[in-house]
Amino acid sequence: MMLFFLLALVALAAFALFLWTLRTPRVWPLAMMMLAVGAMPWRASAAALDTFLTAATPGLLELIGLVIAAIIAWGTKKAREKWGVEIEARYREALQSALMTGTRLALARQLTGSAAMQVILEHVRDVGAPDAVRHFDLDAGTLTNLAEAKLEQGATEKVKGNIDELLKAIDRRAQRYG
């Protein structure tokens, strides 16, 4: 097996030298001489070549298998890099959306404190994003912290919306009474 790889290395080196000689016009005579020397034994050693190829076939097949495995590993790595990020972004977006939906649901029911947290957590775990919770392996404490942050954000948005509506109503009244 080692002999086969050594012969393959020598053949590759000779082929590279031959290609180099073809690209450089000044050394074309060297290329022709290499071609003539390389072609001389073909006819005389046809039987020896068949014997060599028969002996080298298992090594060649193993080498081809290694190359194919390397290509598959490289392709898998590239696919994981590309699509892994997209999948994680989808889970993150689903989790944020479920947290916000649960918050809106709790605020619509006018719940506060632990009752609001319970509604948000149940929505996220059961309906909104159970796959995202499993993907990120979120424990109860982390999920509770996320829900608290979303509840504060939702309450702030609701208060801000109420203030905006109140200011618009005052503006309408002020315009009416001039």
Image: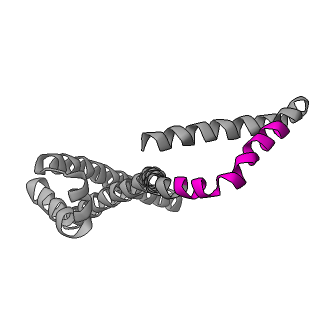
What residue is drawn where x is 45% and y is 50%?
70
What residue is drawn where x is 34% and y is 52%?
157
Instruction: Return the residue nearer the eye: 113 or 160.
Output: 113
Instruction: Return the residue nearer the eye: 130 or 76.
Output: 76
Q: Is residue 178 visible?
A: no
Q: Is residue 3 visible?
A: yes
On the image, the x and y values in percent for residue 146 come to: 22, 48
Q: Is residue 32 left or right of residue 74?
A: right
On the image, the x and y values in percent for residue 175 come to: 53, 58
Q: Is residue 100 left or right of residue 124?
A: right
Is residue 157 shown above or below 13? below
* 40 in magenta: yes
Magenta span dominant secondary structure: helix
Answer with the quarter of the image where residue 2 lies. top left
Magenta stretch?
A: 31-52
Q: Residue furthest bottom?
A: 127
